[in-house]
Image (cartoon, rainbow, N blue to C red):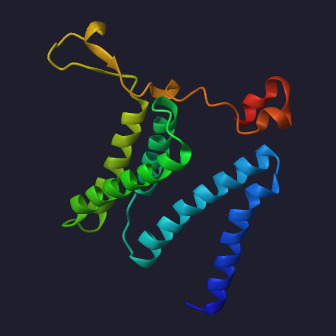
C-alpha cells in the first residue's frame, strides 16, 4: 500500500466528516449518505471477492440487517441514531460471524448457495407481516402477532429530500 493511498483516504474521510457542517441541501446530504452506505458494501465485496477469493452472496444481507436494525431501534424503541448505529453494527458483525461459522467447512459453490439462502431468509423475515402460532394448524388471526410490519413496517419516515426538490405530488417518484 502506497503512502499516497493513505493521504487520499484521509482527505476523503475529512470531506465526509466536514460535509454535513457545510449545511448542504437535505437532498444532497441524503444522497451523500446513501453514497457512503453503498461504498461500504462495495468495500465488503472487494475484501471478500477480490482479496479473499470467496464467492459469498451475504454482504447485502449483512448490510440490510444493520440498516433494518438501525431503523427498528430508532422507530419503535426511539433510540438516538448515534446509539442505534453501533448496536446495529455489532448485530451485523454477529450475523456475519454466524454465517462465517456455517461456511467454515464449505467450499466453492456451496458457500455461494448457503450465503444466498441466508440472504433470502433475511429478505423473507423482513417482508413478513405477522407470525402465526404453529400450535394451531388453521391460520387463525387471533393466533397471529405483528412482527416487522412487512413492507409497510417502516413506511412513515418522511422523504429523502425529494419533496423539497420535486414539490407537489411528484416527490413519491424519487422516494
Residue closer to the observer: 107 or 165: 165
Q: Residue at x 46, y 75 (%)?
A: 50
Number of numbered markers: 0
Looking at the image, residue 15 sits to the left or right of residue 45; the answer is: right
Q: Residue at x 42, y 70 (%)?
A: 48
User: Where's residue 174, x and y in %?
Assistant: 74, 36
Q: Residue at x 75, y 60 (%)?
A: 19
Single out the residue that lies furthest toward the bottom: 2
Question: Is 107 drawn above or below residue 140 in the view shown?
Answer: below
Single out the residue that lies furthest toward the left: 135
Q: Residue at x 36, y 58 (%)?
A: 93
Residue closer to the observer: 37 or 139: 37
User: Where's residue 128, x and y in %?
Assistant: 38, 28
User: Where's residue 108, x and y in %?
Assistant: 29, 68
Question: Is 145 drawn above or below residue 95 in the view shown?
Answer: above
Looking at the image, residue 20 sits to the left or right of residue 86; the answer is: right
Q: Quadrant of the C terminus?
A: top right
Quarter where residue 105 is shown:
bottom left
Q: Quadrant of the N terminus?
A: bottom right
User: Where's residue 85, x and y in %?
Assistant: 49, 50
Question: Is 14 drawn above or below residue 140 in the view shown?
Answer: below
Quarter where residue 133 is shown:
top left
Amino acid at each position: 500500500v502506497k503512502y499516497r493511498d493513505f493521504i487520499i483516504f484521509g482527505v476523503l474521510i475529512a470531506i465526509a466528516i466536514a460535509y454535513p457542517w457545510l449545511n448542504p441541501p437535505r437532498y444532497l446530504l441524503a444522497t451523500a449518505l446513501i453514497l457512503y452506505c453503498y461504498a461500504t458494501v462495495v468495500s465488503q465485496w472487494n475484501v471478500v471477492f477480490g482479496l479473499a477469493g470467496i464467492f459469498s452472496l451475504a454482504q447485502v444481507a449483512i448490510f440490510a440487517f444493520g440498516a433494518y436494525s438501525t431503523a427498528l431501534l430508532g422507530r419503535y424503541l426511539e433510540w438516538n441514531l448515534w446509539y442505534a448505529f453501533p448496536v446495529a453494527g455489532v448485530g451485523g458483525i454477529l450475523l456475519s460471524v454466524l454465517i462465517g461459522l456455517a461456511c467454515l467447512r464449505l467450499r466453492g459453490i456451496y458457500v455461494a448457495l448457503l450465503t444466498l439462502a441466508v440472504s433470502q431468509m433475511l429478505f423473507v423475515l423482513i417482508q413478513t407481516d405477522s407470525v402465526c402460532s404453529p400450535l394451531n394448524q388453521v391460520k387463525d388471526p387471533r393466533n397471529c402477532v405483528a412482527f416487522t410490519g412487512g413492507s409497510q413496517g417502516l413506511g412513515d419516515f418522511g422523504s429523502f429530500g425529494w419533496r423539497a426538490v420535486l414539490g407537489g405530488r411528484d416527490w413519491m417518484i424519487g422516494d
